[in-house]
Amino acid sequence: MLDRLSVGLIAGLVLATIALLAVGLVDARLAPVGSPPGVPRAQIAFFATWLLVFLVSPFRLPAIGWVRVWTLAAGVLLLLLPLEWALLFGWSRATSGTFGRVNTGLLIAGAVVVAVGWRVRPRDSADRLAPRGTSSTMPARRDLSRAHVATAIIGAVATALASAAAAGAVTPGDPIEGVAAGVLIAPPVWVASLLYGLLATDATRCLVRSAALVAGVAILASLLLALG
Amino acid sequence: MRTRSVTRTFYEVHRGLGTVLSLALFVTAFSGALTVLRDELGIWGNPHLATGAPPPAGSGTARITPERAIDVARGGATLESFRQIIVLLPAHDEPFRVRLTPREGGTLAEVFVDPATGASLGVTTNRAADFLFDLHAYLLTGSKRGRNVVGLLGLALVVSSVTGIVIHRHRIRDAFRIEWRRSFRRASADVHKAIGLWGLLFHLLMGITGAYLGLKDVLASVPLVARFGGDVTAARAALRDSPPAPAGESAAMPSLDVLVASATSAAPGLEPNVLILDHWGDRNARVTIRGTASGHLLPKHEAFKVTFAATSGRIVAVESGLEASPILRLFHAVAPLHYGNFAGGMVKVAYLILGLTAALLVLSGILVGASRRTGRSGRVPSGQG
């Protein structure tokens, strides 16, 4: 338990930093068009993400399993940061000057972190001695395949993006407030849907769950919009 | 026997520090690595503050004066309403940064002004880079206490690095071999030892300079308090560089560009980057021009200091980082060595990577400790004396 909490605390800081940068970009995009200053959305996202990752880490996987999940997740999210920048501030500026250098650095860092996460293979001495295709660890704490973890992470990203878009669409009034609502809802939805995907027994079921979540969010948003 | 006992003690110290401080060390190391890119992340996170490329030399396109930047930044407010105005001069594609401190208290404002057009670019809306710096340097406490704690963590990094090398001194020849295919615990231990050895000099440098930066106010105040017979208030007053009180009479102010030219003549090598205006517009106004000299290990804003009595334009004091004593030059080198901002972007990238190795060192240490707890009970590593 202590190991998984340690992993949660440390991975939580890394993911919280990515959330801080991601939500900070939205702050920078919103403020010039009149968003009320002083709402520390980026800091809220930072601490919320750190707390959520810490709280999720005791469940389902052994510590090393969570190391792989969070490493891959951090890599995927780092790869998405330049995409977010380009969507918010324009594709042409994303490659120029300081912006281009930082975005390129983020892409390289994301690729490296994904590669490292992909290579992390938990093999305890007991596992190595166990017959091929079996595991010495408890079934409830059994580690997951790379495909399962990757599916859960990408599915969680899709669910979070869909939820953010839906929150933005159904928020009445100023569309800017809708974007802000979407940004705030994305980190918790991402972590929750990641855990939901990891709870599936294999990659295929995880994919089905992720698709169902995205579809559910879309249907719910459509209903809310129709009612509104 | 004695060597074994000493090694055992070092091991206990190493493990104890890791158990108690590993998380705080990781937070400091990880945020510190990112803080190296604070300026770049600040611009990246606030694209509306970025200006275009600077006009080419000799193109005839001059930048606006600092006075114009101040006028734009203060909007309709009078000069008398500000106790202090700090102007950070633009470099490369950066804007003017004008910090306004109200006379009657209140919130300090920082306004960005385009040096080419004189247009106000607004304020920083994305403070993510500053937040990471506060996490690294103050642990988000915003006080000197937090900075002192970070200084102590720097000392802990030094002690941990040294004890780690001592307890594994007989395995140095294996320290560059990482057995990825064996158990995760073994791989973590190999990574921990390899990074500890490969990055030893950098980690010691970060630990020592970080400890100095975090504890320098404590270190400086001890002899000063002793000098004032234990009177802390008097010692603090002596440390504070207070400007003269305002006279309450308006006076004509000299051109800041002219003062900058005078400062560079008075302090050869000075590359001015900060103007500090106390009571600007008042008869007792004071101007301090600060800067650095490229190609030297000097702090960015504090290596040079030329102080003027603003009304007369007379130079009151000159401090040159290039003419400082060797001891002072050593202290001047601490901040640039810690933050890696003494050369170009490649040095910053190297600092970022090496800084992340410090975080990875702590992380691998945590994983080794965790594996040990879940596996065998803790024991001194084999082959240690």
Image (cartoon, helix red, strand yellow):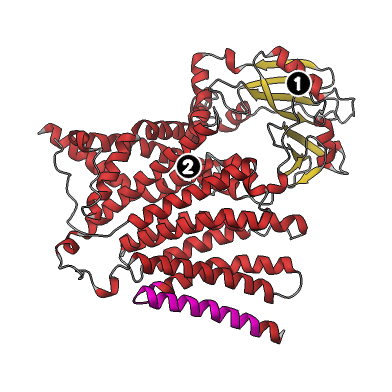
Q: B212 or B238: nearer the eye?
A: B212
Q: Badge 2 local density, few (<14 within 10 Å), some, or many (20+)?
A: many
Q: Residue at x 51, y 41 (%)?
A: B147
Q: Main secondary structure of the magenta part?
A: helix
Q: Is residue B141 rendered magenta in the image?
A: no
Q: Position of residue A36 (x, y in %)?
A: 74, 60
Chain for disc number 2: B
Q: B309 or B76: nearer the eye?
A: B76
Mark 2 → mark 1, Cα distance in angstroms = 34 Å
Instruction: Determine if residue B218 is in view.
Output: no
B78 lies left or right of A141: right
Q: Which residue is mark 2?
A: B33
In the picture as drawn, the residue positioned furthest to the left comes out as B1
Q: Which residue is mark 1?
A: B260
Q: Which residues are magenta?
A: A198-223
- Say above or below: A176 vs B33: below
- Say above or below: A77 vs B116: below
Q: Residue at x 60, y 82 (%)?
A: A220
Q: B334 or B248: nearer the eye?
A: B334
**Residue type for callout 2:** Ala
Q: Position of residue B355 (x, y in %)?
A: 43, 40
Secondary element at tag 2: helix
Chain for disc number 1: B
In the picture as drawn, the residue positioned furthest to the bottom comes out as A227
Q: Residue at x 17, y 61 (%)?
A: A128
The quadrant of the picture occupied by the C terminus of chain A is bottom right
Q: Is residue A220 rendered magenta in the image?
A: yes
Splitting the image into 4 quarters, where does residue A219 fall? bottom right
Q: Badge 1 local density, few (<14 within 10 Å), some, or many (20+)?
A: many
Labelled pair 2, 1 in contact (Cβ < 8 Å): no
Q: Earlier in the sequence, mark 2 or mark 1?
A: 2
